[in-house]
Amino acid sequence: MSGTDAPGQTPPDVDRVAAARAAVAARRARAAVKADVAAGVRTPLEVAQAAWTPLPVDTADADPASAERSMRVRDLLTSIQGIGPARAEIVMGSLRIAPSKRLGGLGVRQRGELADWFVARSSRSRGSSKLVVLAGPTAVGKGTVSAYIREHHPEVLLSVSATTRAPRPGEIDGVHYYFVDDAEFDRMVADHEMLEWAVVHNSYRYGTPRPPIDAALDDGKKVMLEIDLQGARQVRTAMPEAVLVFLLPPTWEELVRRLIGRGTEEAAEQQRRLDTAKVELAAQDEFDVRIVNSDVSTAAQEVVDLFLAR
């Protein structure tokens, strides 16, 4: 008998087909669980508890919670609205859970800490304060989306940034930005009054005054920041509970059209901003949520909906 004919070495075709079908069914079952969590039909804690429920001996061949047990913790976290790959990585790191871990394979300590995290997050989300950070490449329409939210959703407090650049036509000091000189900006940084700040486009400085943010969150208000990529990274470090949103253009061509069409920069400055935009677009996977700004009202509503997410 040849080696290839030895029993057990090469599964029969029928076994391979059955295994492939089982794998597809398992993936579909896990996808259905994720969809239920994303839609709010099931809570993450309910899914986790199903995965951790002891399996009766007489049902070992038909595990009713096999999808939950075999689901990776990372996949469960990213099915929660407002949590992307970057945030899931931070959460798992804080809970000392390896990226490849499945719910059914967690130890007792890990199960307890993950359950506590789900409970704490749910308690914070129900009617409590929340910080959402809106960022994206130049000319994507962050200001337009923010203005729409300011006008149509007064329950959301939009933070006012400070900047050393001059006002553009129509911009009002204290409404769109706090327009300050370099000396005042230096003072605010020295006195630790900035939640984040950065030099943008190799020219002007932008920053978010922190005291008003802390006061608003302490009062249970919903706060949104509209800032650049560097600032969003600083906020993630300073306030990891914030939800980071990346606003995308429908296409690169549309982004170019918007930048040139607004006519607020010279040709050299336009090219510099477009070069910066390419770098910024490459960082979109760092964010929890990505929203395409094809329509201002739709994009604004998607941002506001994050405040109501579990």
Image (spheres, grey):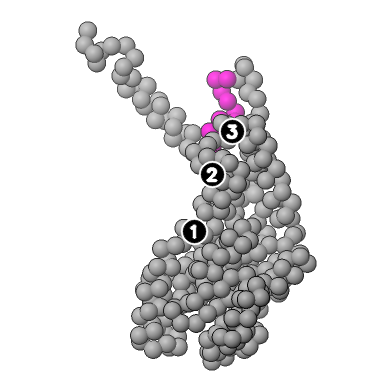
Q: Amino acid at mark 1?
A: Glu
- Left or right: residue 171 versus residue 6 is right
Above-or-below relation of 273 to 75: below
Q: Quadrant of residue 301?
A: bottom right
- Where disc 2 sits, the SS reads helix
| Farthest residue, direction top | 1
- Left or right: residue 261 versus residue 55 is left
CA distance for labels 3 and 2: 12 Å
Q: Amino acid at mark 2?
A: Arg
Residue 164 screen position, x and y as percent:
55, 85
- Left or right: residue 179 versus residue 100 is right
Give the magenta range.
Answer: 60-75
Q: Residue at x 61, y 76 (%)?
A: 189
- Where disc 3 sits, the SS reads loop
Q: Locate the N terminus and report the quarter of the image it occupies.
A: top left
CA distance for labels 3 and 1: 26 Å
Of the image marks 3 and 1, the number of the one nearer the N terminus: 3
Q: Which mark is residue 106?
A: 3
Residue 35 screen position, x and y as percent:
56, 46
